[in-house]
Image: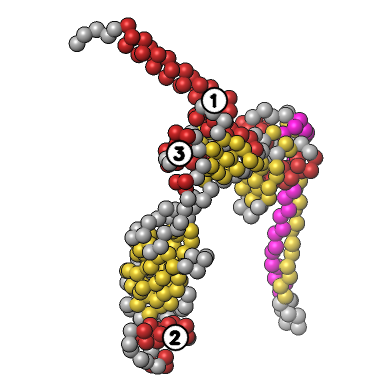
Amino acid sequence: MGRMNTAQKNNTLSFRTRAAFFLLGTLAAMWVWGGDPGLAARIKDIAQFKGVRQNQLVGYGLVVGLDGTGDSDKAKFTIQSMASLLEKMGVTVQPGDIKVDNVAAVMVTAELPPFARAGSRIDVLVSSIGDAANLQGGTLLFTPLKAADGNVYAVAQGAVSTGGFGAGGASGSKVQKNFPTVGRVVGGAFVEKEVSSDFMQRKFLTLTLHRPDFTTASRVAQAINDALFGPVALTADAGTIQVEVPDRYVGNPVGLVTLIEGLGVTPDQVSKVIINERTGTVIMGENVRIATIAIAHGNLSIQIKETQEVSQPLPFSEGETTVTAESDLRIQEGNAPLFLVESGVSIGEVVRALNALGVSPRDLIAIFQALKAAGALQAELEIM
């Protein structure tokens, strides 16, 4: 092969130079606006594009083929539904002549994915609404699924899989695993109608944050502007970022969405302490700080011991045997010294300062409540 001429060498060096500057600019933007690159999260994981979401579907149907574990005669709606179904098939019966031991009335729910096309398959969840004991081995009959606008978008039918079982004996003993009155039909619904969308023709895309925050929204907008080399992203509020589709992505918004979703941004967090008094759980965020304060926390222990004393009468006396209760009450108060807790600069120092008190998680709950009342806790206190 021949040697490269001067023009080819210059082109190669120019390409490498541009690539190096682009890489340095991207890393600098991540450090300045997104925090530590090692802690960055994808925009795809902290936000979503407006209008790109699932739609909930619901329908009423019947599950047949049960082995005597269906609804009882008390479920009048099941009997009426079965009679109506048979009548539509040309079979005329009286509701009083129908036994529904092998039939169960169910509600069928599903989620229609965004951009689902006619003919696509989706899973459906089947839940008993009568007094059926088990849906195992049943088959869901033709069930239209409607959205909030009242239109039918899918039709479900197929074998029900419960993932559990239930069995009982004549004496009343019962063994059950999971919930056999709820099942799933995998790929049991066909999409019949598509949800209209103007996504391909949009000139603006809107990002909504899962947890609205002004700092996070600013970081997301800056990351998008740095990646697209222009002011195309604007923060409308703490939870919304509007992105103008560049000319090179007109007619190809999928490529733009793919680029934006892959960008890394470090979400900002509010300093918060979460307390669950029922379980004694205390969770502290990364940015929790405590001002310099002195803490003394003592424990009060009360122990009551009950004993029964039997009193016997003298021989040949007319007395009766009696039982008396005696209580032994002991009170012990802990000797807790006064600790000086310095203002912490990290979550580790805060934890070490609190551990020095030797308190339990439930004691921490009382301490945090007192710190908040004293104004020394520089964080939100949320009690669940």
In percent of the image, x 35 and y 13: which residue is there? Answer: 12
Q: CA distance from mark 2 to mark 1?
A: 66 Å
Q: Residue 250, labelled with which disc?
A: 3
Circle 3 — which element?
loop
**Does the magenta-highlighted stretch encompass residue 311?**
yes
Mark 2 surroundings: few (<14), some (14-19) or many (≥20) residues within 10 A:
some
**Pair 1/3: label in front:** 3
Residue at position x 67%, y 28% in the image:
345
The count of marks equals: 3
Q: Residue 181: x and y, percent?
A: 43, 71
The residue closer to the viewer here, 278 or 53, is: 53
Q: Give the SS element for disc 2.
A: helix
Name the residue tied to disc 1.
29
Left or right side of 240 for 379: right
Residue sitting nearer the eye, 384 or 144: 144
Dot 1 falls on a residue whose secondary structure is helix
Residue 134 seen in the figure = no
Give the main secondary structure of the magenta stretch.
Answer: strand
Q: On the rendered structure, is 162 left or right of 197?
A: left
Q: Would you name the residue on which mark 2 appears?
A: 80
Q: Are marks 2 and 3 in contact (CB under 8 Å)?
A: no
Query: Which amino acid type is shown beneath numbered disc 3?
Result: Val
Closer to us: mark 2 or mark 3?
A: 3
Considering only vertical position in the picture, is 54 above or below 47? below
Residue 173 x/y as whole percent: 42, 76
Q: Is residue 160 visible?
A: yes
Distance between mark 1 and mark 3 Cα atoms? 26 Å
Task: Give, as a three-letter code, the residue at label 2.
Answer: Gln
Residue stretch rendered in magenta on the structure: 290-312
Q: Disc 2 or disc 1, which is closer to the eye?
A: 1
The residue sitting at 64% across, 55% down in the picture is 278
First in sequence, mark 2 or 3: give its number: 2
